[in-house]
Image (cartoon, rainbow, N blue to C red):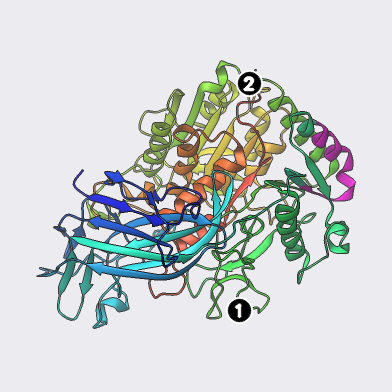
Amino acid sequence: MRLRAQLLAIIVAGLFVASAVSVGIPGVTDTSIHETSPADGARTRQLSLTFDAPTLGDRQSYVNVNVDGCHLTRSAGQPILPVATETLTFPLGTRVTDVQVSTGAVTTISLPAKPMPAPRLISRDGDLSSEVYEGPVYRGSGMYPDEWVRWRTNGGLQDGEHVTYCTLNVYPARYHPGEGTIEYIRDVEITVSVEPGEGLAAGDSHDMVIVSPLTFYPAVTRLVEHKESLGLSCQWATPMQISRGTYFPAEGEDAAEQIKYFIKNAVEEWGTRYVLIMGAPGRVPMRTVYTQPAADSSETFTSDLYYGDIYDGSGGFSSWDSNDNGYYGEYNHSGNIDEMDLYPDVHVGRLACRSVIEAWFAVDKIIAYESNAAGDWYNRFVVAGGDSFNDMPQWGTDYYEGEITVNASVDYMDGFTPVKLLGSNGGLTTENIKDEWSQGAGFVNLEGHGNYLSWATHPPHDYNTWVGIQVQDIPDLGNAGKLPFVVLGGCHIADMSHTYECFAWQLVRAVNKGAIATTGFTSLSWGADDDVNGNGEPDIIEYASGYLDILAFKQYGQHDITVAGELCDAAVTEYLNTAPVEWNNAYLDIWDCKTVSAWVLLGDPSLQLGGIQG
């Protein structure tokens, strides 16, 4: 690999809880950490990065600008340019006081055409809005981006510890629209100065909190007994107890915020790592957010990441209502923006039960699943996908986006036997999906389109034909005792705002069949078509929902994370470390924010995938 990066860290002993992690730069060849105690008490970390010169490629009437080993920006309407991302890890509450940047020689070259602008992402409801348009940068006179390095801090989790992430975006090539040139650097040194935080001195009395209505008591007590038999200490609380201050003083403007403050107190006082919300949104509320992909969009959606994102980068409370106007998660909402941290600080999952009967059977499934080691069926990985989008003719590609996504998921899952039901191999039929599901599998991944009652996609080049599985097919599944963890790619497939229960939840609520847990989107989900950035990789697995879905399998197959909530939150964290949301600049890509905040785990966050071995 030609991109070389060397990390030199000069820190006070004990300042950092973990080594610096390099995220998104595949060319890192040498990472070393040295601990010293400077006489002046300075606490700094220094990074030295070396890049290849950029290469230019023709792209319609534009040019692609690439630097080997770098990712590429994709803010709609703005030039696609290379970016290298480094994420540093500190104890929670560490404050970054200064970031100094020193570059090597700056070289200017004239471009034969403008850099390729990033198109809008495509919603998975079939809206092909991936047209190319030139945003305001192309009409400006300043450099884009306006700095060689941009950075931000976030509060999150690493290996179970509460940390502050400092994410650095390094732009080795910048565009000058007024001159028709790019400036690029081969070398940059970055010095990050910090005031160390104390971390989080949490208690250790309750590993998991369960929030449910009082009427779910019979089901909750059975689950608590089971979890505590596995060594997981639990505490049950009802929304009424939370609002009355039974355990901690009640705080918050509404029921959802009161629950979030309760979770914060549980994390700090009890050492809580998992939060199971047992109840549909009508029984235990979800947070309605106003993160809208366009100024003319009226869509709102619900998010459980709101409950999981407790801390910002300074260790303060992440309210999701930074302008204090009572609307949460705003972007493009009457011109308002709320700054959200987005990184999970506690593992949250939901069993969207509407009755104690549903809760009872959901708990039955969890107890049976975890009480037995999985058989050979667990090593099967059933995937289905087709040709999600009609590729734009100007790009000259002919990708089958769903197939590409599920194949990428399979690539991460070493040791599993893939069962590929694809449009291109003739395996994509409703009957095949039901038959293979019924034989049992450890994991299922469906990538295509969705609504709250079904998942479907297209055979190659046949965009009038829909093939998939619907809620009325779930009773036909015969996988008793062989329940998969299911990742669903498609719009609204986990949308719990309707009278009828959504597809993602109906798989979990099905009695002794269906799924042990699912992930899906509560809103429109977004994807990327073709290979607009020209780096040779299909954009569907580099951006938005397709990228997040495959990261879930990466956590299990490559990082050995086998607990459901930990797996999902590690995927969100890696997504944000690779594509960080930069709130306070003109280059914000709101699709990244919406992708992670609309993704929900319907299942027990403490679930041990594969059951308890031995």
Query: Is disc 1 placed on a helix, strand or loop?
Result: loop
Amino acid, disc 2? Gln
Which amino acid, by three-letter code, is at mark 1?
Asn
- 91 or 354: which is nearer to us? 91
Q: Residue furthest front?
A: 39
Residue 119 can be seen in this image: no
- Per the picture, the main secondary structure of the magenta-coloured stretch is helix
Range of the magenta residues? 210-225
Q: Would residue 369 appear left or right of 528 to someone viewing this image?
A: right
Residue 8 position, x and y percent, is 32, 53
Depth check: give the residue in front, 336 or 469: 336
* Secondary structure category for the residue under label 2: loop
Q: Which mark is residue 323?
A: 1
Marks 2, 1: nearer the viewer: 2
Q: Callout 1: few (<14), some (14-19), or many (20+) C-alpha neighbours within 10 Å?
A: some
Residue at the limit of the structure toward the bottom, as seen here: 141
Task: Tell me what residue is drawn at x 39 percent, y 59 percent.
Answer: 128
Q: Is residue 429 above or below residue 220?
A: above
Q: Position of residue 453 (x, y in %)?
A: 62, 46
Q: Is residue 204 magenta?
A: no
Classify mark 2: residues with Cα within 10 Å, few (<14), some (14-19) or many (20+): few
Q: Is residue 40 above or below residue 425?
A: below
Q: Of callouts 2 and 1, which one flags the residue occurring earlier in the amino acid sequence?
A: 1
